[in-house]
Image (cartoon, grey):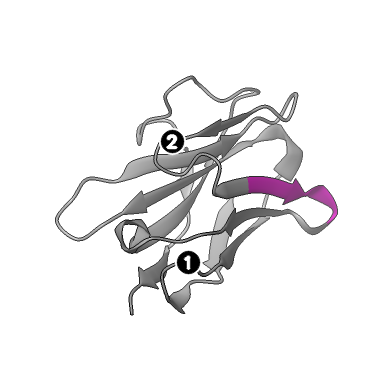
Amino acid sequence: VQLVESGGGLVRPGGSLRLSCTASGDTFDVYSMHWFRQAPGKEREAVSCLSASDGSTYYSRSVKGRFSISRDSAKNTVFLQMNNLKPEDTGVYYCGAEWTSICSDEPSVDEPHYWGQGTQVTVSE
């Protein structure tokens, strides 16, 4: 599976961005899809996950209520809608695909089998 992210950029605090991750090379719907992020000098952390089987979701505590994950199976694409962005949301955002039917309660970097190259999100005045 090849994953390509897009949609990152520079935005002011309180603004919005929508990230996209398009998959190719395998059946998209069998994968649960993740978004992780990595800030400078920090470890990669889970942001959100969308289960393949039932559409259940995971959001980290820091983004719950502000971010929303969704998928368009016809386009083999998963989205991350990010609203009310804060400077602490700054980082490289990575899409990951995991061969599993349902997201775990606390996703870890060991779970995705495939990763995209990342897209930079910068929240700053």
Q: Report the residue at 73% width, 30% height from top.
A: 55
Magenta region, residue range: 69-74
Q: Position of residue 74 (x, y in %)?
A: 85, 54
Q: Relative to 38, say whether 32 is above or below.
A: above
Is residue 70 visible in the rendered image? The answer is yes
Q: Report the residue at 60% width, 25% height from top.
A: 100
Q: Position of residue 16 (x, y in %)?
A: 55, 67
Given residues 44 and 18, the one toward you in this image is 18
Q: Relative to 78, say whether 99 is above or below.
A: above
How many C-alpha atoms fall within 10 Å of the one at disc 1: few (<14), some, or many (≥20)?
few
Instruction: State the predominant SS element of the stretch in magenta.
Output: strand
Comes first in the chain, label 2 or label 1: 1
The mark found on residue 14 in the picture is 1
Residue denoted by label 2: 60
Outermost residue on the left side: it is 41
Q: SS at mark 2?
A: loop
From the viewer's perspective, tell me whether residue 18 is left or right of residue 107: right
Q: SS at mark 1?
A: loop
